[in-house]
Image (cartoon, grey):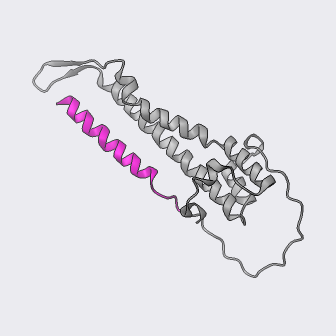
Amino acid sequence: MLKSLLLVVAFTFTTSAASLAQTALPAAPVAPTAAPAAPAPALAPERLLPPSQVKEKYKDYLYQRYAADRKALAAVRLFRKRQAGGAIFMGVGGALLGTLIGVQGKHDTGNGGQLTVTVSPLAYIIYPGPFIGVGIGKLSRFSDRRLYEALDGYDCTGTLPNYVQGRLRERDYQ
């Protein structure tokens, strides 16, 4: 009875978390412009700063820097979504690990008895392991450092790396 209840709770939590990973974040509001200004003289663009040298959020810095470049903004959005997905996977894995830790031990039954639940050490790997592994993989492959390397190369060559270009979809350009 207790195992089936925990299985239902775990399944419900993972499906709701997976649906959150598939939703799009709302677009940032655009401030209305009064009148078109005269174009500023073209200045040599400064070199892209790495994440360690930016005081604000790195994505905010990139959104300002590449405000007029659709392809670079699409890459930033792609990395943002993949990082959010990695964080969700890590959260689900952590919740499953917490559930396993919380369920083991002695529990009172409704009729005055006690039920002892033991969790196999292998269960600590089998249940949360895949979620934590996928989360770590996403967070390492789509880190701010990798985004910096991709956009720095884009500034030099005008093309994004193949692993970024192959993942871009039409929704990333919006």
Q: Nearer the viewer, residue 137 or 60?
A: 137
The C terminus sits in image quarter? bottom right
Give the residue displayed 75% in from the left and 53% down from the top. Answer: 154
The reply to whether the magenta stretch includes residue 6 is yes
Query: Percent position (x, y) of residue 83?
Result: 56, 45
**Chief secondary structure of the magenta portion:** helix
Position of residue 110 in the picture relative to residue 14 (left or right)? left
Give the residue displayed 36% in from the left and 42% down from the top. Answer: 14
Up/down of 32 relative to 43, above or below = below
Position of residue 145 in the picture relative to residue 171 (left or right)? right
Up/down of 54 relative to 173, above or below = above
Seen as rendered, the residue at the extreme left is 111
Q: Nearer the viewer, residue 85 or 149?
A: 149
Query: Percent position (x, y) of residue 125?
Result: 40, 24
Give the residue displayed 39% in from the left and 29% down from the top. Answer: 97
Query: Percent position (x, y) of residue 93?
Result: 42, 34
Query: Percent position (x, y) of residue 57?
Result: 68, 48
Up/down of 41 relative to 20, above or below = below
The reply to whether the magenta stretch includes residue 123 is no
Q: Quadrant of residue 128?
A: top left
Position of residue 114 in the picture relative to residue 11 (left or right)? left
The N terminus sits in image quarter? top left
Range shown magenta: 1-26
Q: Quadrant of residue 68?
A: bottom right
Report how many numbered discs are placed on residues in the image: 0
